[in-house]
Image (cartoon, rainbow, N blue to C red):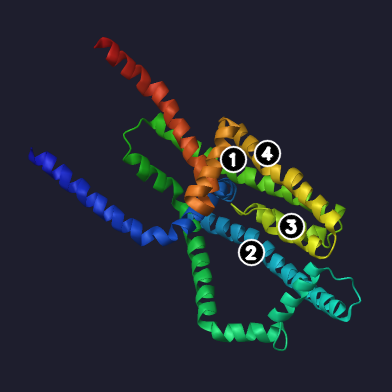
Amino acid sequence: MTQRQVQAIFFFSVMVIVGAIAFFILRDYLLILGVALTLAILFRPLFNWFRRVLHLHLGGSAALTTIVMFFIFAVPLTGFIILLGTEVREVYGRVLGFLDAERQGTIAASPLMHWFAENIRERIANNGSIVSIVEFLSRNVATVFSNAGDFFFSTFLFFIAFYYFTKDGNIFRQKLFGISPLSDASEQKIYQRVIDAINAVMRGAIIVAVVQGTLAGLGFWMFGVGAPVLLGVFTTIASLIPMVGTSLVLVPTIAYLFITGSTASGIGLAIWGGIAVGLIDNILKPKLIEQRLKIHPLLILLSIIGGIDVFGFLGFIVGPLILSVSWALVEIYREEFHPYLASTFMNE
């Protein structure tokens, strides 16, 4: 073994060890970094527009893009929290009214409704739910403040990562491609595939979420559920959550209809939710992604399901992303390596 081979073995051994240590250091933040990178890619056209039209430097354009992104997400989130608080107070008042009516016998209570009422009474005993909440907070104050601190730290880290991914994205890409042995054309093909996959998945997810929220709101209105517009907005937001999706809103609403005795409406909403709302996610989303990636919708659907199963929350992005990069590698092999390997074997 030559000295050069020994040096190479030593170098790569050290690189693997250091890489493993770096992974364990960063693993708790990979989700935040992944989301920040994804949104930085989505907001790249806005960043380029600030650079071109306002003639800002990299830092200024990245800072302005970060501010815009903050308001795009923070303002609707604040409004959502306010609406949620209003609805919670209204629902709480309705529940108290239902409990009083059930206790006084002014409404016809089925065994299921009676069990439901007794269960709620047990949970808001001891002078009402406010006391219970105060006692819960006093017992778990450390956990509450710890979770709040983690949330604000994660949010702060996300915006910092988003800023630097937006500002230095091209530098990161050049550093990564600088150690690649592939040709410039192949590297550009893989890079473009990644960009197309992220844009297709995110935009497809947003379009599907709006369609599902609209259809769900229509179903809430048709079957007599209160606040159909607000519930439709909740369904739109829930549609963006992998694994649970629209069921996060539809299932409790259907259960509410059955519990309150509106059996026909509950059955109707269940059918509507399963067909009109549920199938959209499995038909429209793969089709929207397929139009941009030029990959069969069945493969895209399987990549989304498998990605969520393996990677969890980010799987609905990572799955199609890996599929898209794999497809690009197949194309690179067919264009660059297949002719070379075929000629080599034929010459032998």
Report the residue that reaches farthest toward the top: 347
Q: Nearer the viewer, mark 2 or mark 4?
A: 4
Point out residue 150 in the picture as x, y percentages from the top left corner.
Answer: 49, 71
Question: Which residue is found at the position 46% from the left and 36% from the top?
Answer: 325
Relative vertical location of residue 6 with respect to residue 236 in this rendering, above or below: above
Question: Which residue is found at the position 32% from the left and 57% from the top?
Answer: 22
Give me the C-alpha separation between circle 2 and circle 1: 24 Å
> What residue did someone put label 3 on?
233
| Amino acid, disc 3 | Val
Question: Residue 105 or 95: which is nearer the viewer?
Answer: 105
| Amino acid, disc 2 | Ala
Report the residue that reaches farthest toward the front: 111
Q: Quadrant of residue 100?
A: bottom right
Few, some or many C-alpha atoms within 10 Å of disc 4 (few <14, some 14-19, many ≥20)? some
Give me the C-alpha separation between circle 1 and circle 3: 22 Å
Point out residue 141 in the picture as x, y percentages from the top left corner.
Answer: 54, 83
Relative vertical location of residue 257 with respect to residue 280 in this rendering, above or below: below
Circle number at residue 200: 1
Circle number at residue 74: 2
The image quadrant where one finds the C terminus is top left
* Left or right: 258 in relation to 196: right
Give me the C-alpha separation between circle 2 and circle 4: 29 Å
Q: Please tell me which of labels 2 and 3 falls first in the chain.
A: 2
Q: Please tell me which of labels 2 and 1 falls first in the chain.
A: 2
